[in-house]
């Protein structure tokens, strides 16, 4: 049960400081409002600790204005505790009051309609060329379309790091930027306590090193969490490109959301996956990678180990075997291939070559075994080797 005293600005105005001496002087022109919780053993402020009214007696007149409540013992004890000094807080700061916590909220589905405009930082042609090279192999940008990549390139800011042992980010701090390395080397340290500590070993243990084309700082931005590591430069004249938190979340997270919706809609049209639930298809959509091949490219080669399963998103492809110069099968949108090597843990049984420019959705071996269990029986029934064996046995 708490009683709090709230002060409202008087002639001192909103600029008065309630915690400092100026605030104390302005209290003379303020009024106090007492809040009481239910069940607090203190006489309600509307009664002002007056003696009880005898039956039949006239009620006393109205209470004089600006008369303060005489608190009961519980409230007096609370005031004494609140007045005690506390580390890092003013003496009149009420530690008993509840505090509120707020966090950034972003809805990916409303990204196009919330009025957000990506920042644009002008770059020379030479800077733009260097930047494209730096982000070309970064996995976080691999799924962005041309428009989204252009937004990222426009929003990135060059951050020269002129010397060694400069801390770029510190474990435990709030994350404001994501960094891509263009030049130099950076060591990554993690302290088991969860935050950087003062002292020679304050950074903790070295866990990794990143160089040109690498990146760091995305975890704090993706999950709205403190920095998970400390990163320092280990080479002179290094260079980073920085992307602010809001732009990173709007572009990268919106891209992931839109990509999932696109794949979910596509997977609904794949006959093999029609028996899966929407949740099962969404899990597969999250694990898929998009690959593009020009006409005449070999997507899988006969005899190679099987590492992935493919679904044709667009274009046409043909199947070849080493003992035949003509295609033995053809694939179009929605068809899948590459499953046999994964089902039987065997080398590729045929080569698949793109007839036109194609786009395929690729699912790695581990994800294939983990996510496609419900349709494994269907794929085994469609195994051409089993169908050929069954055809060779009469009545089977």
Image: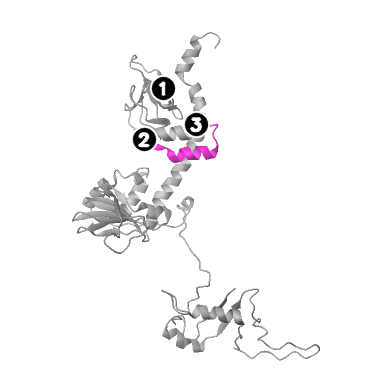
Closer to us: mark 3 or mark 1? 3
Question: Quick check: 12 left or right of 31?
Answer: left
Residue position marked by numbered label 1 in the rendering: 330
Horizontal side, residue 263 vs residue 50: left or right: left
Question: Which of the 4 image quarters holds residue 78?
Answer: bottom right
Find the distance from the CA under tag 3 to the CA under tag 2. 23 Å
Q: How far apart in space, not on screen, are marks 1 and 2 (Cα)?
A: 19 Å
Residue 288 has which mark? none
193 vs 301, nearest the viewer: 193
Residue 287 highlighted magenta (yes or no)? yes
The location of residue 9, given as percent across then percent down, is 50, 82
* Disc 3: which residue: 373
The Cα atoms of the two marked residues, 3 and 1, are separated by 26 Å
Does residue 141 appear to the left or right of 77 in the view shown? left
Give above or below for 239 relative to 349: below
Q: Is residue 291 above or below residue 226?
A: above
Nearer-the-camera pick, 297 or 90: 90
**Picture quadrant of residue 121:** bottom left
Q: Which residues are magenta?
A: 272-292
Q: Position of residue 168 (x, y in %)?
A: 28, 58
- Classify the position of the C terminus by image quarter: top right
* Residue 274 coordinates in the image, percent (x, y): 54, 32
Say what secondary structure mark 2 lies in.
strand
Outermost residue, top side: 394
SS for callout 1: strand
Q: Dot 2, crowdedness within 10 Å: few (<14), some or many (≥20)?
A: some
The quarter of the rendered structure image containing the N terminus is: bottom right
Magenta-drawn stretch contains 199: no
């Amino acid at each position: 049960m708490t009683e709090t005293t709230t002060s409202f600005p008087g002639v001192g105005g909103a600029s008065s400081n309630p915690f400092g001496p100026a605030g104390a002087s302005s209290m003379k022109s303020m009024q106090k409002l007492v809040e009481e919780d239910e069940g607090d053993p203190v006489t309600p402020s509307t009664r002002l600790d007056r003696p009880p009214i005898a039956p039949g007696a006239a009620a006393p007149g109205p209470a004089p204005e600006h008369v303060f409540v005489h608190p009961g013992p519980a409230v007096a004890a609370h005031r004494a505790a609140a007045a005690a000094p506390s580390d890092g807080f003013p003496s009149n700061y009420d530690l008993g009051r509840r505090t509120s916590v707020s966090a950034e909220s972003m809805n990916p589905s409303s990204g196009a309609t919330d009025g957000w405009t990506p920042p644009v930082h002008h770059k020379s042609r030479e800077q733009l060329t260097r930047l494209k090279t730096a982000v070309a192999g970064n996995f976080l940008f691999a799924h962005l379309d041309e428009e989204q990549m252009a937004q990222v390139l426009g929003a990135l800011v060059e951050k020269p790091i002129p010397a060694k042992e400069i801390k770029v980010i510190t474990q435990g701090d709030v994350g404001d930027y994501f960094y891509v390395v263009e030049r130099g080397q950076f060591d990554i340290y993690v302290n088991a306590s969860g935050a950087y500590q003062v002292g020679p070993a304050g950074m903790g243990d070295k866990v990794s090193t990143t160089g040109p084309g690498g990146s760091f700082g995305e975890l704090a931005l993706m999950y709205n969490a403190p920095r998970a590591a400390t990163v320092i430069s280990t080479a002179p004249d290094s260079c980073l490109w920085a992307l602010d938190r809001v732009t990173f979340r709007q572009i990268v997270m919106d891209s992931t959301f839109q990509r999932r919706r696109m794949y979910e809609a596509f997977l609904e049209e794949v006959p093999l996956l029609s028996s899966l639930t929407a949740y099962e298809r969404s899990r597969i959509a999250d694990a898929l990678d998009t690959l593009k091949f020009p006409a005449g490219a070999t997507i899988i080669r006969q005899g190679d180990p099987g590492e992935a399963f493919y679904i044709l998103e667009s274009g046409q492809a043909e199947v070849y075997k080493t003992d035949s110069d003509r295609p033995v099968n053809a694939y179009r949108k929605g068809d899948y291939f590459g499953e046999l090597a994964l089902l039987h843990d065997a080398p590729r049984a045929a080569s698949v070559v793109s007839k036109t420019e194609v786009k395929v959705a690729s699912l790695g071996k581990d994800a294939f075994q983990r996510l496609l269990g419900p349709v494994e029986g269907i794929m085994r029934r469609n195994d051409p080797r089993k169908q050929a064996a069954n055809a060779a046995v009469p009545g089977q």
